[in-house]
Image (cartoon, rainbow, N blue to C red):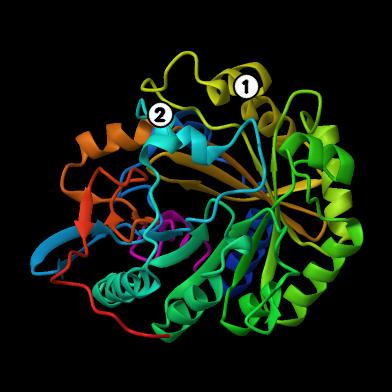
Amino acid sequence: MDMNGNRGQEKNLHPGSPGRHISAFSRVRKAQIAPPAPDPALRRLKFRAFDIARTSTAGRTVRFPLWGRPVTAYGNANLSIYSGQACNAKCPFCVEDLRPASRGTSLACQKTVEGDDEVYFGALKEVLRALRPLNPSVSITGGEPSLDPRLPRTLRALEAHRMRKRTITTNGSGLLDVREGRPVIDWLTSTGIRHLNLSRAHPDPARNGRLMGLERNLTPDDLVRILRRASAGGTRARLSCVLLKGETDCLGGIIEYLAFAEAMGVDNVVFRQLMHPGPGAPANDPVLGFSESNAVKLDPVLEQMTVDPRFTFIKQVVGYYYYVEVWKYRSIDVVFEEADLGRIELTRRMMPGIIQELVFHPNARLTSTWQPWDGVLGPFLENSVSVSG
């Protein structure tokens, strides 16, 4: 191939009338080109294929000073704002519980909340200022952030610092609550949240409530109100569904869920295989036990979709502990995700000195892991500033 990706032997095949013959040849070639398809090697290796230079979305690292010392971070690193608000759901597959379990501890043992608003927001704003050279995407997660009294002020801080690609993940139960004079959903749209990830284990409200352990379950009318307000305000909503045996567990169930999403006016849905906890989780952990008994493997579903003409392949994304495929079904972007928490520690050992992601914990500390005690970066008292907002 030449520098533009053209095959040299295809040039000037018929010198007598090159334009006409090359054009005809190109039309034949185009007709023979197969539609895009997943790379089977990436599908097989998944996150094991992660390589910053070759397979990552950023393809680079960023070196910048963080509170007086140089650090190196993945160029597309995400900053998670981890809400201290306890979740009102009792999902037996809870990722918030699974993360500490993957490191041999428990949520109750490690989650602490900074109770002083001025200290908390002073630290948050110092973190946002310090990370400006990296310019990370930002995700608000929990816990349950839609119930967090601090959410409006957090949103204002992110907007003031012009953080890019702001996302929130929630079960939605507090989105119609009024905080500081307006519904929470309106706070999201007015402060520039680009993506609203709504956890929904099943289209049926009763089954969704049972699966997620939610007493305060969104009714269909509530869900429609939220989705319409999000759309009107420029925030794209996505429904997030875990694959569970006996529930959404096969291609037919996925298509039923997509029909529900389409009826709700949603054009983005993610289906997740229950997370692998990694080797550090205790054998008697209840979330691990549930996952082992109820997980639905993603690979057979993806193999079926590959030959199903109703689905069009878009792309694969390889992360340091997750693997994603994006497909199109009718007007809906359909995302499939598999993740392995054990890969987080393995990647840290394989790529020492590189920060893969950032988490601002409820204790007002920034770390490079989901554990508030591991990979602590700051800010410390000498870094923090108290700023009202």
Identify whether 257 is placed above or below 74: above
Q: Within the magenta stretch, is there residue 13? A: yes
Q: Within the magenta stretch, is there residue 374? A: no
Of the pair 193 and 150, the residue shown nearer to us: 150
* Quadrant of the drawing holding the C terminus: bottom left
Identify whether 71 is placed above or below 94: below
Q: Amino acid at mark 1?
A: Phe
Of the pair 327 and 338, the residue shown nearer to us: 338
Q: Secondary structure at mark 1?
A: helix
> What secondary structure prevails in the magenta region?
loop
Q: Earlier in the sequence, mark 2 or mark 1?
A: 2
Instruction: Tell me the residue at 39%/62% (across/down).
Output: 115
Mark 1: few/some/many CA within 10 Å (<14, 14-19, 20+): some
| Residue named by callout 1 | 290
Q: Amino acid at mark 2?
A: Ser
Instruction: Tell me the residue at 8%/69% (across/down).
Output: 68
Of the pair 340 and 105, the residue shown nearer to us: 105
Q: Secondary structure at mark 2?
A: loop
Horizontal arrangement in the rendering, residue 365 relative to residue 142 (left or right): left
Of the pair 321 and 313, the residue shown nearer to us: 321
Rendered location of residue 152, percent (x, y): 55, 76
* Residue 366 in sight here: yes
Instruction: Tell me the residue at 62%/75% (across/down).
Output: 188
Residue 314: give its label: none
Horizontal arrangement in the rendering, residue 95 relative to residue 330 (left or right): left
Rendered location of residue 139, percent (x, y): 49, 62
| Residue named by callout 2 | 102
Mark 2: few/some/many CA within 10 Å (<14, 14-19, 20+): many
Q: What's drawn in magenta, residue-wise?
A: 1-16
Rendered location of residue 184, percent (x, y): 67, 73
